Image (cartoon, rainbow, N blue to C red):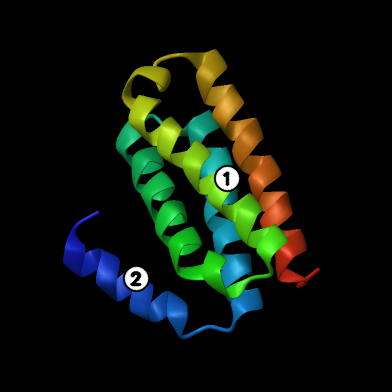
Amino acid sequence: MDKDRSEKLRERFLRDLLPRRLGGLAATLGRISSSARNSTNPNHVDNLLDEAKHFIECTAAETIPETAAELVQMQTMITLWQRAWTEASQSPQQRLLLSVQAKDWSDKAVDFSGLV
């Protein structure tokens, strides 16, 4: 993600209250889950992974320590997926694995948000 886009996304994201930001993270993770399974464009998934990393970066420090630790662990796994995505996107099994993992992360982010 280029620096200008990243900064604009960060500014917009930080305007929201913490529960809404966690809900936004959950939505992005849900889009990763769906796109990993269905998208024919690996760049789309890569961009969503990048967006999720930035959302976590902007949010984790404002959560309780237990939630922050889980978010940082998610961010680490997202980074690993992103590094391997070009190759992994060619494997239906790897695409399914990311899809399932992103759905689990999305569910956790919704729980963290308290919105549901």
Dot 2 alpha-carbon crowd within 10 angstroms: few under 14, some 14 to 19, many 20 or more? some
Classify the position of the N terminus by image quarter.
Answer: bottom left
- The residue nearer to you, when weighing 22 against 40, is 22
According to the image, label 2 marks what residue?
Answer: 9
Q: What residue sits 65% from the left and 32% below the top?
A: 100
Q: Is residue 35 above or below residue 97?
A: below
Q: Is mark 1 on a helix, strand or loop?
A: helix
Label 1 Cα crowd, 10 Å radius (few <14 / some 14-19 / many 20+): few
Amino acid type, mark 2: Leu
Q: Which amino acid does label 1 sit on?
A: Gln
Write down the quadrant of residue 82 in the picture.
Answer: top left
* Among numbered discs 1 and 2, the one appearing first in the sequence: 2
Judging from the image, what secondary structure is the residue with disc 2 in? helix
Kindly identify which numbered label has been placed on residue 73.
1
Residue at the image position 60 percent from the left and 24 percent from the top: 97
Q: In which quarter of the image is residue 87?
A: top left
Q: Where is residue 64 in the image (x, y as percent from the top left)?
A: 69, 69
